[in-house]
Image (cartoon, coloured by chain):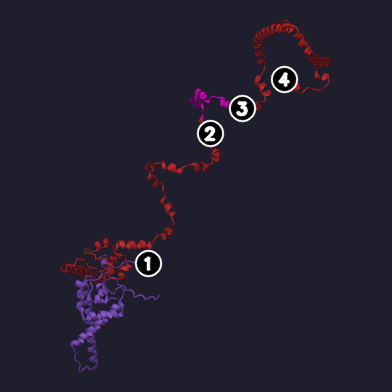
Chain colours: A red, B purple
Amino acid sequence: MRLQEHHGCMAEPHRGSSSARGMPAALDAAMGAAVLATTAAVSVTRVFARAVGPVGRLVMHPPLLHERLHPARVVDAFADRGQRARILANADINRLIAATVPPVVNEVLDSLDLTELVRQRVNIDSLISTVDIVAVVDRMDIDAITQQLDIEGMLRQVDLDAIVSKVDIDAIVRQVDIDAIARQVDVDAIVSQVDMDAVAKRIDVDAIAERIDIDAIVSRVNADAILRRLDLVAIAEEVVNGIDLPEIIRESTGSMASDVVRDARMQTIEADVAIARIVDRVIRRRRARHTDAPGEPESLSRAKPATSADIAQANPLPPPPAETPKERRP
Amino acid sequence: MSTHVDPIPQEARPFQGHRAGLVTRTAAAAIDLGIVLLALGVCYLGVSAFLFLLEPRSFTAPTPSLAIMWGAGGLLLTGYLAVSWVGSGRTYGNHVMGLRVVNRDGQRLRALVAFLRAVCYVIFPLGLLWVLVSGYNRSLQDLVLRTSVIHDWDVRPVQARPAPTRP
């Protein structure tokens, strides 16, 4: 505290009376006179030296004397001797300082609280701001430092749980631009590398199916919309043709007479085919009969034309040859 | 959109629209002949009843000559066939046997063609036998008048001939 007050006194001296300074006024006056006299003497000396400089050089180097006899040689000899004496004195002083200063400094340092002194006297922030951290880092051999570090030992001492518990994951996630990351992801390339077969084999479809609430899904289905999109008439027609509904109706409602008529018609057809075959064989007709009727018969125009499979299934008789009337008309 | 259930048995569908053979057509003709003979008998009974009502005491059963019998039978048969072919395209015999008479366009016959075809059949019924040797299952009458007798088990009549459109 005293140091700080003293330091402040030195930084900003008071401009009051001598008594206020704490020093005798006579001493200050004497020092002021001495300073003034010294300044004046220096000025006079400089003027005098400037004036007698050429004279001094002429005295030191007379033009008529040999150089060995110049007074400057004597002055140089004195200078050399003085320099040697000064060097010896410096060595003695250095030895003296080396012997006396360290103990003194140690004693002084022991008596001072350097940490507190630095904290009060030194502006650490301004000092650090002047340091070029980048240049320092560039000069560092990071590899060598890393090789000397015991990373595993350091990691063992790190309490990751404590660190993680202090991390605000939500804040980090909020700052992440998921859209930007997603735009940079090449999904096609990732998918192309995925073995979908292997993935599918690992999926437990049964377990997934058991967890599906079919009733809930069905309850959300708009059955009316689906039915409107279906061609129910075409489906019904296909079903009716598949099950041969007319045959079922005939069997359930047909009378004895209709069965007789139907059998009679089929028998006459069979007889026609048999007789035609015999006659064609007798008259050695090579070409098959062309029985296609002209135009579009009512029964064929209303029903789907029978396929060759239907013909083979319906009757063992040879099917009538198919040829358009225009081809066979003479 | 309308659906259609084909009433024709599956085994008969391949023959629909094809010309019928001799047996089927002969069977149909036999039925028609029987109907005409039955109608002749009814006519005879009718005439006899009419004569009986006129002179009950002196009534004797009429004994028409053979020419009258053939003439009346021919006329009745001609009229029956022509009217049936023009009307529904099939006689009762054709209806029973599932046949239909169509022209070269597959449609009902014109009245004149139907009449000429009926006359031809009454005058020369043996022309039907040409079906045996015809490569197209056609009788002589069919060849002359360009008609066909086809299998058509559908009970609905053939549509009427569309009216000719004038440009």
Identify the residue under disc 1.
B2
Q: Chain of mark 4?
A: A
Residue placed farthest to the left in the image? A282
Question: Residues in magenta?
Answer: A130-159
Q: What residue is disc 2 on?
A: A165
Disc 4 target residue: A3
Q: How far apart, in angstroms, are the residues tagged by discs 2 and 4?
A: 48 Å
Image quarter of residue A42: top right
Please say if A277 is above or below B69: above
Identify the amino acid type marked 4: Leu
Asked if both marks, 3 and 1, belong to the same chain, the answer given is no
Q: Which residue is mark 3?
A: A132
Instruction: Using the rendered view, name the quadrant where residue A309 is placed.
Output: bottom left
> What's the amino acid at mark 3?
Asp
Residue at mark 2 shares a chain with residue at mark 1: no
Cα separation, mark 4 vs mark 1, equals 116 Å
Q: In the figure, B83 relative to B154: above or below?
A: below
Mark 1 falls on what kind of element? Answer: loop
Which residue is at 20% across, 92% downward? B59
Q: Does the CB distance between marks 3 and 4 fall below 8 Å?
A: no
Spatial separation of the CA atoms under disc 2 and disc 1: 74 Å
Mark 1: amino acid: Ser
Q: Quadrant of residue A9?
A: top right
How crowded is the residue under tag 4: few (<14 C-alpha within 10 Å), some, or many (20+)?
few
Q: CA distance from mark 2 to mark 3?
A: 35 Å
Q: Position of residue B11 (x, y in %)?
A: 25, 65
Q: Is residue B107 magenta?
A: no
* Left or right relative to A218: residue A279: left
User: Looking at the image, which is closer to me, B149 or B58?
Assistant: B149
Q: Main secondary structure of the magenta part?
A: helix
Residue A219 in the image: state x and y as whole percent: 43, 54
